[in-house]
Image (cartoon, grey):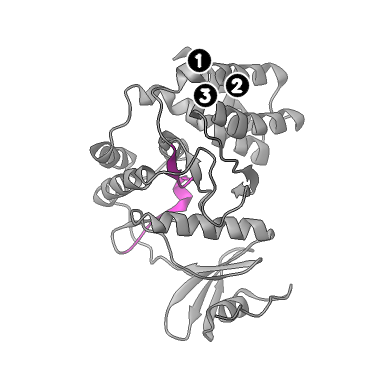
Amino acid sequence: MTAPPAADESESAGTAAARLTGRPVTGERPLSGTLAEVTLDDGRSVMVKRGDDPGAVRAEVAGLRWLADAGTVRVPAVHGHDGRWLVIDRVPPGRPSARAAARFGHDLAALHATGAPAFGAPPPGGTEDAYIGRARMRNVPVRTHWPSWYAEHRVLPYLRRAVDGGTVRHAEAAVVERVCERLPELAGPAEPPARLHGDLWNGNVLWGADGHTWLIDPAAHGGHRETDLAMLQLFGCPHLEAVRDGYQDAAPLADGWPDRIGVHQLFPLLVHAVLFGRGYAEQAVAAARSALAG
C-alpha cells in the first residue's frame, strides 16, 4: 500500500479526509477549531481531528488500536492518519441508560484485565512522549510496584510544574508529597498493570445510538485499574453506580477501594491544575488531605 500524499498547512478537514481515506467528500461540518464531521461519498460520516504535534497523533492512534485490539470496549475505527490529521468513525449519538452503563462497566473490567507489559508501558507503536488532553505525559515502562511508578511518573512531575507556575503553594505541595511517601500503605493490595484508557472523563465516553458506549481520545498506558474508575467519578458520568455495578460483577475491586479514590484522582487533578489553574489545585490538595486522613 502506498502512503497518502503529504498534507499542506492550509489543508481543510474535508481535503484531509479525502486524501487519507481515498474517498471523495460530499459534506463538511466544523465542530471546533480542530474537529470536523465529514461525509464521504459512500454515505459514511467520519470525524476528522487536527493535531499540532505529530507525536500526539501517533500516540492517539496507537492508543485507539490498543484498546480496540482488546476486543472489549467499543472504539471508533481509524480510517487514516498522518502527522497532522486523524480520521475515525463518527459514533451516532444516543442517550445514556443504566443498561448501557452496566454493560460498559463489564467491558471496562475486561479491558483492564487484558493487561499491559508494565506500569507506564505505551501502546504498541506509541511513543514515550505522549499527551493527556493538552498536557504532555511520559510513558516510561517501569517493572516495579505501582506506588513508586505513580509517584515518580504521574503525580510529582505535574506537582512540580504546578508549583513552578504558582498554582500550588509550597506548603500545599508538602501535603501531596506526603501522600507520595505513604503510597505503599495507601495503595491497597498489589495489582498487575492494567490496560487503561488513561483519560476516562465523561467527555471521552460516547453513548451510542446502538445502545453501547464508545471510548475516544485515549491517553492509553499500563496503569492501575482504579485510576480509570476514579477519573469517571471525578468529572461525572451518567449512571455511574450502574457502571460500577457492572464492573464489580465482572472483576470485584479490592476491599477499601472507596478510600483510595482521592489517591487516584491526584494525577488528573494536578494535570488540570497545570492546564487550567488554581481551582483544580485546591481540589488536588483536598484529595491529598482526604487520602491522608482516611
Tell whether label 1 touches label 2 (CB within 8 Å).
no
Front: mark 1 or 3: 1
Numbered marks: total: 3
Label 2 SS:
helix
Report x, y in % for residue 250.
25, 41
Amino acid type assigned to the residue bearing label 2 in the image = Val
Q: Residue at x 49, y 26 (%)?
A: 263
The numbered dot on residue 176 is 2
Instruction: Provide the residue span drawn in magenta.
Output: 193-209
Q: Residue at x 34, y 40 (%)?
A: 240
In primary-sequence order, the first of circles 2 and 3 is 2
The numbered dot on residue 292 is 1
Q: Nearer the viewer, residue 273 or 8?
A: 8
The numbered dot on residue 64 is none
Q: Which residue is drawn at 32% across and 46% down?
A: 110
Q: Name the residue under label 3.
A: 287
Would residue 281 be found to the left or right of residue 120 on screen? Answer: right
Label 3 SS:
helix
Q: Distance between the residues labelled 2 and 1?
A: 9 Å
| Vertical relation: 173 (above or below) 117 | above
Residue furthest top in the image? 293
Q: Distance between the residues labelled 2 and 3?
A: 9 Å
Q: Does the magenta stretch include residue 200?
A: yes
Image quarter where the C terminus lies is top left
In primary-sequence order, the first of circles 1 and 3 is 3
Report x, y in % for residue 162.
69, 31
Report x, y in % for residue 29.
55, 73
